Image (spheres, grey):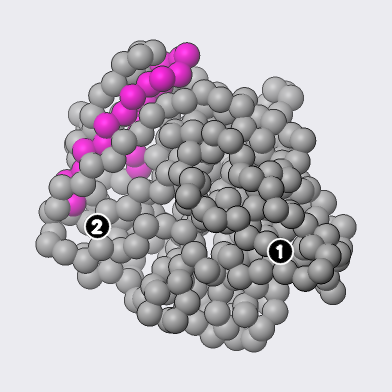
Amino acid sequence: MNDSFGITRRELLRLGVIGGAGALGGYLAGRAGNGGHQMVTPMGPNPHAMMPGDSLYSHGVEPPESLGPQALDGLTIPPPFEPGARGRARQFELTAVEMPIEVARGRTFQAWSYNGTVPGPILRATEGDQLAVHFTNKGSHPHNVHFHGTHDVNQDGWEPVPVGGETTYRFTAEPFGVHPYHCHALPVSEHMAHGLYGTMIVDPPGGRPAAHELVLALSGFDLDGDGQNDLYAWNGVAGFFARYPIKVPVGELVRIYLVNLSASDPSVSFHLHAQAFDLYRSGTRLVPDERTDTVTLGPSERAILEFRLPVRGRYMFQPHQSRMAEAGGMGWLAAT
């Protein structure tokens, strides 16, 4: 997100609390990457009062009370694009950690995670950069990291890394676009269903036009082990963006890096209410593939969406599979 618009990137997710709730409270212990946030006092004399337009539908699944409006900043606001010489060396650290996380109010998931969050950290590079991704397995099962995109087959990341082991994946970041990464240890379905996945953005060498940038990665959580997801969440917490809408300025360009990381569903969709977006499938082209208000994604498919919200108000976004929306996948973009 570009700060030249007169509003900081983090202020966009921090401007007040539409819909109330989520009083003071600390942030979920053990969620890596969210440290250092200041707590924000909700606006108004009664932070729990319903605002005009609120409904039980919009708050059917609540996020944990311990999470404030900034709790998902680290998984929603990507690192900025860094212009520079082509082929720079970049290093990243990923560690497999197995831990329980609270994915909705009173709902705990036994996660296998990268760096303590589901999804894992957002990685960002420029096409042509030379990447070294150091991976450490601190879990109780063999794990690894497989990156989508183009790379040397010897760095494909399917070989299991034993418990306590480590390795370094070295490859060139290409092509530009948005690519998932995930564990590819067998059975892959089990490792992904437990949360071992994340998003990597690869920028074109000249970057993209300045915009307010967001990552939205859809997860499904099977809480009872029956092979069916019980909750759906953008960036790891069901109902979070229904309670804490994402704030963007009216009329300015918004860019969403959208990734489907729900492992057990044959397809999901993203629908933006009241507006259409330019759709860049996989983000590997600089001209849009179409203009629409709904995109369907298979497992690990992704896209870049660009749009402007022309008037003040709340714009709903959701999977168009209603059960997913009602099980935590519905959220708001608030144009301010």
Residue 252 in sight: yes
133 sits left or right of 39 in the view:
left
Disc with the residue nearer the chain's start (1 vs 2): 1
Residue numbers of the magenta segment:
129-148
User: What residue is disc 2 on?
Assistant: 126
- The image quarter in which residue 151 lies: top left
Of 31 and 219, which appears nearest the observer?
31
Q: Secondary structure at mark 2?
A: strand
Is residue 208 one of those drawn in magenta?
no
- The image quarter in which residue 43 lies: bottom right
Who's the residue at 49% across and 33% down the image?
A: 116
Disc 1 from disc 2: Cα separation: 38 Å
Is residue 132 one of those drawn in magenta?
yes
User: What residue is disc 1 on?
Assistant: 42
Residue 4, position as x, y percentages in the image: 38, 79
Looking at the image, residue 66 lies above or below residue 141: below
Q: Are marks 1 and 2 in contact (CB under 8 Å)?
A: no
Q: Give the position of the N terminus as an image quadrant.
A: bottom left
Of 107 and 310, which appears nearest the observer?
107
Who's the residue at 81% across and 69% down the image?
A: 45
Q: Secondary structure at mark 1?
A: loop
Query: Badge 2: how crowded within 10 Å, few (<14), some, or many (20+)?
Result: many
